[in-house]
Amino acid sequence: MSKYGGYQGKILKIDLSTRNISDYEITDSERELYLGGKILAAKIIYDNIKRKIDAFDPENLLVITTGPLNGLLAPCSSRFNISGISPLTGLLTSSNCGGTFGMKLKAAGYDALIVTGKSKERIYIEINDDKVEFKNADSLWGKECMATQEELQNMQANPKLKTGKIVIGPAGENLVRYACILSDERAAGRGGLGAVMGAKNLKAITVQGTHKIEVKEKEKYQALIKKWIEYLRKHPLTGNQLPRLGTAGLIAPMQAKNILSTKNFSSGRFDKFESVSGEVLAEKYLVKNSGCISCPIHCTRVVSVNGKNVKGPELETLGLLGPNILNDNLEAILRWNYLLDELGMDTISFAGTLSFAMELNEKGMWDNGLEFGKIDKIDELIHDVAYRNGEVAYYIGEGSRIVSKKFGGSEFAGNVKGMELAAYEPRAAVGQGLGYAVSNRGGCHLNGGYNVILEGLGLSANQYTPKGKASFTMMFQDLMEAVSAGGSCLFTTYAIFPPSLIEKPNSKLTRFINKAIPHLGSAVALANRFPGILSLNLPTLFPHPLAISYATGMKLNFGKLKRIGERGYNLERIINLTLGMTCEDDSLPKRLTDERQQPDNKRSKVPLKKLKKTYYRVRGWDKLGRPTKSLIRRLRLPKDSAAQIYGAKAN
């Protein structure tokens, strides 16, 4: 058990090969160092996987983790994490989800669940407090995600009692490399962990329980949460833009800044962008807003597809299945988003692989029948990919990196480390380009630090200069890692920008800050190197450290929480180096580094070599992108981690 509040103090480990059920020990010292969520998951994976393994190897772990704020009604705190070795990248991946499973797992008395091995039969797991049962899943195999969840709910002893569920669809069963895992309508989308479940013959896990969660300083916690919710509701991003337009509201500013991925990242602008914008989505197709449990933001779009009210598409889906394939049919995107969720596939990786295949066909490199702007066969293709029907569908289900190895075109294959890029065209946001390249899980905008919010989607710092971008990338990566590990949605971090900077973009103060940002790199680098100078709390702008402190009894502040994020980011890096990654994998497609997005603007390409060199230095990594031995000691990372990446003689 744990002395800290916010934790249940137990981790459940299930071996599918042996049907062995056991407790997995984590000490309070480890909770202080790794907190929870994806960072704690990285520690568990590091301790159990010391060599390169295939993602479909039974030894691969699925590690499902919560954070200390989960279940305590902090705003946007229903998030949980799933980590493992990715079939798409061969590296560590983590995927965050807003469904109810994490909260129900804590209610059953567990902070985390570890699944290893492979079942001989198709099964699902049912957890009810201390009782764990393995049940035959033959009747569920082949079913789509919502039908599976509905049937699982009806099979409960008390069907009226809401049960937490994670499930896979046909794509996971058929080992599509970017198959996702769903909880309710929410997807743990990136990295293909749905295929790992499929490889383990595991269709689903259900969980419910009756345990309460302790809060150490209840009155202070409740008072802070009340003020936090009020602030989020008043902030122009979390209280206006996201509720009004959702993430789709970014389509128009991305177009204005040349950041909107268009025609397989060959351009940053789409003439018909308005047809797939957040404004049109809200005006013509929005049924209502929705949100995760305990979320005051309600950014989710509910739309109607085939007479059903379902979750609508996020920005990434709109951008990548719209402009990036030269499609302006919003109704089709709504339908595809629903189909991909039901079949259990990551919309980003499907769309990125699709646009790459279209360009290969256009260039005569792969005769696959897919053309930019022609969408009449995509519904059928989505089904075929999920069921692995036909050669074209098979390769689309493998992801763009494997397709490029088969047919060529790696210089315009939109992925990093095998994971397809998000919808931001980085030649007009070079800090985001750096983030893509060095992201631990691949072409991810969030794990990459989301520098684009400084480069036009919040503030308007110079989007082409490399100055300061490496230091800000590190700062944002570390903070977002820590916030996620605590159990909060990353949208809560939008509110760290004072409202006046967002509401008054043309004020003298805002213009001054935008001009100053590139010149603050040295100061931010100093704070990155010595986070102790940030030993303060910002209870209004960034209440996460105080909320975790009041919940758990740990003594956290801004600097300490950032250090936890830095520790997690470096541990993930060490795991990936152990799995065979090198500094050469911190790369971008040559289209983005060698070709100008705008022929008359020589700065409109990502100066990655320069950015990477600075980033490695501010991170405290050597020239090969490895955390130095002194950094490993300073971060109190596992004692044998230096030996893992430098060899057995490291000390």
Image: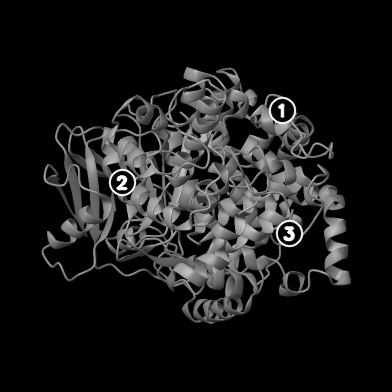
Q: Quadrant of the N terminus?
A: bottom left
| Cβ atoms under marks 2 and 1 closer than 8 Å | no
Residue 492 is at least partly visible in this image: yes
Which quadrant of the rendered structure holds the C terminus? top right
**Residue 550, position as x, y percentages in the image:** 52, 71
User: What crowding class fits label 2: few (fewer than 14 Cα within 10 Å), some (14-19), or many (20 or more)?
Assistant: many
Tell me the number on the disc at residue 534.
Answer: 3
Residue 211: horizontal and vertical position, in percent?
A: 28, 67
For the residues marked 2 and 1, what is the alpha-carbon distance in whole angstroms? 43 Å
Q: Is residue 147 left or right of residue 247?
A: left
The mark total stands at 3
**Given the image, on which type of amino acid does mark 3 rest?**
Leu
Residue 343: mark in rendering: 2
N-term mark: 2 or 3: 2
Secondary structure under the numbered disc 1 in the rendered image: loop
Compute the Cα span from label 3 to label 1. Answer: 25 Å
Q: Which mark is residue 368?
A: none
